[in-house]
Image: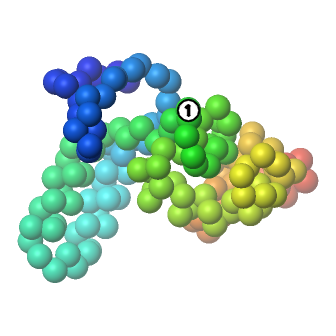
Amino acid sequence: LYAEPEGPVMSRSGDLCVVALTDQWYLTYGEEKWRAQGEACLKQMETYHPECRAQFEHTLGWLSQWACSRSFGLGTWLPWDDQYLIESLSDSTIYMAYYTVAHLLQTEMYGKDRSLVKPEDLTDEVWDYAFLEGDVPAAVKAGTSSV
């Protein structure tokens, strides 16, 4: 995915920004199942004001993909690709989930020392087990996983 800006990009301080094409990871919020879950959740929410609900609905309508990584600066390395850091504006999506297990994956806060858990063993089934009360993954049962 690559999109050219429609006009000059300005920083919050009013400086002109340079836009560069770089590789990065995206969260696919526009994926049909995710969006349907978000819309279903919103229907059950008490937003206390119609304008708030309308803003959520508007955002669910346009948000398709969100860049969640960057290659420099402060932050936590992506567990599945240590070339990239978690983009700071994605922290509300990734960090809260990641920090519930970070102490198991990193032995110190800077992410330099790694645990015995191998990134390739962190399969969808492992995350489903950890966060969705899914079944114990077969590789964990068999003892062939580092998890």
Q: Nearer the viewer, residue 129 or 24?
A: 24
* Relative horizontal placement of residue 49, taking residue 23 as reference (left or right): left
Mark 1 neighbour density, 10 Å: few (under 14) some (14–19) many (20 or more):
some
Location of residue 73 (image quadrant): top right
Q: Residue at x 26, y 34 (%)?
A: 15
Q: Quadrant of the N terminus?
A: top left
Could you say where residue 58 lies in the image, as x and y percent from the top left? 16, 52
**Visible in this render: residue 128?**
no
Could you say where residue 111 lies in the image, as x and y percent from the top left? 73, 49
Could you say where residue 86 lies in the image, as x and y percent from the top left? 54, 45
Could you say where residue 107 lies in the image, as x and y percent from the top left? 81, 58
Q: Residue at x 53, y 63 (%)?
A: 96
Location of residue 7 (image quadrant): top left
Question: Which residue position is annotated with label 1?
Answer: 71
Most extreme residue toward the right is 143
* Relative horizontal placement of residue 66, taking residue 129 as reference (left or right): left
Number of marks in the rendered image: 1
Q: Secondary structure at mark 1?
A: loop
Instruction: Give the image's coloring scheme.
Output: rainbow
Q: Nearer the viewer, residue 28 or 24?
A: 24
Question: Hey, what amino acid is under mark 1?
Answer: Ser
Q: Residue at x 16, y 67 (%)?
A: 53
Most extreme residue toward the left is 50
* Relative horizontal placement of residue 47, taking residue 17 as reference (left or right): left
**Visible in this render: residue 69?**
yes
Q: Residue at x 50, y 30 (%)?
A: 24
Vertical placement of residue 17 versus 86, above or below: above
